[in-house]
Each structure stands twice: as C-alpha cells, then as structure tokens.
Amino acid sequence: MPKLARRITETSPKSYGMVAKAAGMDHTNRDIIHLELGKPHHTTPVHIVEATVTALRNGAVHYSDLPGLPEFRAAIRDKLNSYNGIDAGMDDIIVTNGLTQASFAAFMALVDDGDEVILLEPYYPQHLGKIEIAGGRPVIVALDPKNYYAIDPKEIEKAITPRTKAIVLVNPCNPTGRAYSREELAGVAELALRHDLYVIADEVYDQIVFDGASHVSIASLPGMRDRTVSMYAFTKSFAMDGWRLGYVTAGPEVLGAIAKVVATEVTHVNTFIQYGGIAALTGPSEILADMVADDQRKRDLVVERLNQMPGVTCALPQGTIYAFPNISGTGLKSQDAADRLLQEADVVVESGAFYGAAGEGYLRVCFGSESYERLELAMDRMQAYFNGL
Ligand SMILES: Cc1ncc(COP(=O)(O)O)c(C=O)c1O
C-alpha cells in the first residue's frame, strides 16, 4: 500500500491517556468512577434543547451563512463585548464545531512549515498535535510547579527565536486550574507586542471561574485585539460537549484566513444547533451561575479531601473543572499512580505527565464529571488507597 501522510505518521495528534485505558471497563462488573475526562456531569439546560428542537421542527435544516447565523453571531458579539471585554462586531466572529475546530483552523491559518509555536507546560495535548500537523514546531516552556504554574514572561522570552510565530495560552488552564491574573497576561501581551507574535487563546473555560473572580481575556488588553485569536465553546459552561458548538474571533486578516479553513473543512456548523447556542446566550443567566456554583461546591469537596490524603497536596483551582494535586509525597510516579488507582481503587484520573514533563508528580482529577455523591465515594477510595501504601 502507498504510505500514509507524514503529517500524521510523524506527528503526535491527540492521544487519549487514561481515557483509552479505562475504555470498556464499564462493561465489566466493576463500578468505575470516571474523573479522567472533562465531560460535564450536568445535562444541557432544557430551554436550550427546546429551542433546538423547535428550530428543527420549524425547518432549520438548510445551509446557514458560512460564519454562522446572523442572530447567533449578534448574541455572541454581545457576550464577547460584555463578558470578555473584546471589542468584536458580528462580522468578526465565526461559529465552529467546538473549540477543537476553532484551534485547528487557527493553527492551519497561522503556522507555516518550520514556524515555532510556544506551548506553556503543562499543556493541553491536542494543541501539540495540531501545531505539528500544521507543519510547525511546538516549543515547550515549562511553568514552575513550586509557583503553582504561574506565567513567567522571562522564561517565555528565553524560548523566543526569529522563527517564533505564536504563543498558545489556555486560560483558565486545563490541566492546572489556574485562572491567570491581569498581570500575568500583561506579561504575555508585552512579549507578543515586542516580538511581533500572535497569541492563540483557548478560553473554553472562560465562564467557569470561582469565588466571584472575573475572567480576563488577553484580547481585551491594549494592543492585543488584532494579534489574538480568541476561542470559546458551549462545551463546558453549558454542558454541551456532544453538540460540538464553539466560536472564534480575531482581527480581520486572521479571521479571513480562518474562514477559508473552516469553509474548506466543513462549510459551516449544523444549522439547527445554532438556535440552541442563541438560547444559551440569551436565556436566564441563573442557569449558568447555578452550574458554576455546583462545580465550585465539588471543587471544594475534592480539594479538601485530597489534602487529607497522605503524601498529597492540592492547590485550590481558580477555574475549570480540574484539580491538579501533587502526589510526589506518595513516592509514586504520576502514570504509575493513575494506573494503580484504576486497577486497585476503580477510580480513573489522568497522569499529570500526560500534559508534559512539568506535570510529573501530579494527577489531574476532574471534579465536573460526576455527582457530588460519586465524588465523595471516589475520594473515599483514593484515601483508602493512599492510606494503604
Ligand atoms: C483546553 C481545552 N481546549 C479545548 C477543548 C475541546 O473543546 P471542544 O469540545 O469545544 O472542542 C477542551 C476539552 O476538554 C479543553 O480542555
């Protein structure tokens, strides 16, 4: 047979870590608790489902505008203006199949063969594979766990070369749960402006921030609007992971390039689900607030319980649905601990090293994927396991 494309065989598109190892185990007679995947436990709010079904019944079954329905983009514009502080008009937005498609299109639009793209480690593995598929070279900058993975612009600057094209920023950060401060983001912005770089900002968790904190979008900082690709989705905040619905905004030139990729790849996003997106953005705001409050309650439970386990310490995540406990006091390597917890405690968590070497010594524990009661049971099992070491 002829060879497969090098862009696939010589790159590292997303691997599935513990998700793959735990696959199929639910069909055994073991009661496995899944804290490995960021799949929301909430279900999509009913008014969103109803709006979509009504749209489908009313005949929203044909092609829509390529960048997305105008009334949907108008609702997204209002959210970007008011929540993210991003000065976007409705023509500055493209609706995408989740954030995954937005980021793929962004890398394809911006990264040329041999371009370097900076990833902050621990990183989101999908980004690494996409940079490579686009022909670029991921350049890893390890953040310091001792400083709870705060952004250090001096470390980033050391990695910048004449080939550097962009810095990828996941804020709030999967896997660490950090929501970056305005000062940290200003440090990245200053580098981008001084070295003439793009920032590719994955803000899929922008609406899941805790303790009343405000999310800061880097595109809202002075001078950053046109050099930032800001990407969002309904996936986590509205529990719409299976819908595949997101959006991207950028300056006109970059957005035009992204539009070419999206139109070539999928034409546009499924028409009737866009009505669900309109309902999500224009419906009652208490629904989102209630889901975030529930996530915060679960975060508090998981972090408190993790900190009671021998050899484990866990910082309080400021956003996302993940805790990132340090388990180095148990003497186990991350992958070993994740494997043993699956085999011996029937709890699936991800190894911190899955997100790069800077995550060694950590586990990623998703507190958004199960009910409070199941999380309590998972914590009991983990506690018993670590007690017995
Ligand atoms: C940082 C980050 N980016 C992107 C995604 C994928 O988002 P979507 O399902 O909207 O494509 C996820 C999902 O876990 C994520 O954590």
Image: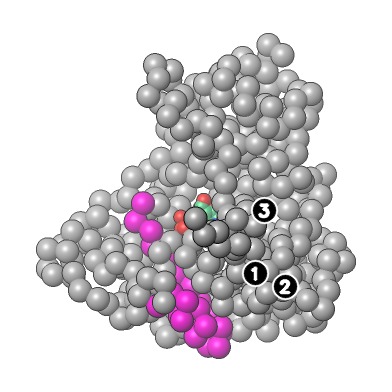
SS label for mark 2: loop
Left of 245 or right of it: where is 186?
right
Q: Which stretch did the figure color magenta? A: 242-263
Indicate yes or no whether the magenta region holds residue 247.
yes
* Mark 1 lies within 8 Å of ligand 1 (Cβ measured): no
- Which of marks 2 and 1 precedes in the sequence? 2
The residue shown at (83%, 66%) is 159
- Residue 34 in percent (x, y) is at 48, 32
* Three-letter amino acid code of the residue under disc 3: Tyr
Badge 2: few (under 14), some or many (20 or more) residues near its Cα, within 10 Å?
A: some
Indicate yes or no whether the magenta region holds residue 171.
no
Left of 47 or right of it: where is 136?
right
Asked if residue 385 is positioned above or below residue 84 in the image, the reply reads above
* Mark 3 lies within 8 Å of ligand 1 (Cβ measured): no
Rounded to the nearest angstrom, the CA distance separating label 3 from label 1 is: 19 Å
Which circle marks residue 123 in the picture? 3
Q: In which quarter of the view is residue 340 placed?
A: top right
The residue shown at (78%, 53%) is 143
- Residue 263 in percent (x, y) is at 40, 78
* Three-letter amino acid code of the residue under disc 1: Gly
Left of 29 or right of it: where is 155?
right
- Which of marks 1 and 3 precedes in the sequence? 3
Look at discs 3 and 1 and give the one toward the viewer.
1
- Which of marks 3 and 2 precedes in the sequence? 2
| Residue occupied by mark 1 | 135
| Residue occupied by mark 2 | 114
SS label for mark 1: loop
The residue shown at (46%, 38%) is 369
- Residue 354 in percent (x, y) is at 66, 43
Look at discs 2 and 3 and give the one toward the viewer.
2
